[in-house]
Amino acid sequence: MAKKTAKKIAKNLKGNSSPAKTGRGRGGTNFPRHSIEKALRIPQALLEQNAGKEATEKEAAQFVGINNPTGPFSVELSSSLKYGFLERPSPGLVKPTERVKRIIRPTSPEDELKAIREAVLTWRKVLSSKSNQVVFFL
């Protein structure tokens, strides 16, 4: 049995890792990477500083105190979209949804809890490409 050097092992691993295998890259996951609390940061800033109106991604980043609307901010934005806290009225624009308004400014005591439950169930519903059935991950 031949011994492999660390360089050869690293080269093999580097060559075999594609975005499809690692889950990284554009559109890599079907689930949010942030907790609900963290995913509420951008929609809350849009509600408080932009009166809940649509804004560009760059404006949304500025509302939360970030200069660059790429990288970690775009992942957080994606999490907010997957929970259903934000919607895209057109490409490049984001707008808070009614769900996030019910969480941040509830009109009844149970309104906030219902909206959080809806958010969790929204991202857990995934369309199975093989059987065309809706699958719930619990």
Image (cartoon, grey):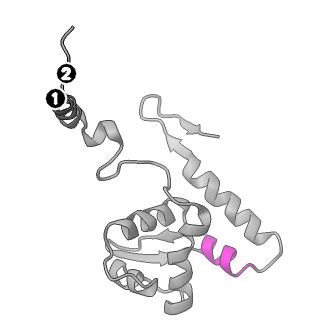
Among the 4 quarters of the image, the one containing residue 78: bottom left
User: Does residue 116 lie above or below 24 as drawn?
Assistant: below
Task: Tell me if I can see residue 96 in this picture.
Answer: no
Q: Is residue 40 magenta?
A: no
**Identity of the residue drawn at 66% across and 78% down:** 104
**Identity of the residue drawn at 41% across and 81% down:** 60
Residue 44 percent location from the top left of the image: 56, 80
Residue annotated with mark 1 = 8
Residue 14 percent location from the top left of the image: 20, 37
Q: Is residue 102 magenta?
A: yes
User: Does residue 92 lie above or below 124 as drawn?
Assistant: below
Q: In the rendered structure, find residue 4 and report the number of the disc placed on it.
A: 2
Q: Mark 1 to mark 2: distance in Å?
A: 6 Å
Nearest the eye: 63 or 72? 72
Which three-letter amino acid code belongs to the residue tagged 1? Answer: Lys
Badge 2, how many Cα within 10 Å: few under 14, some, many 20+? few
User: Do tag 1 and tag 2 residues touch (Cβ < 8 Å)?
Assistant: yes
Task: Tell me if I can see residue 58 in this picture.
Answer: yes
Among the 4 quarters of the image, the one containing residue 98: bottom right
Q: Secondary structure at mark 1?
A: helix
Q: What type of secondary structure mainly makes up the magenta span?
A: helix
User: Does residue 112 lie above or below 124 as drawn?
Assistant: below
From which residue to which does the magenta span run?
A: 98-106
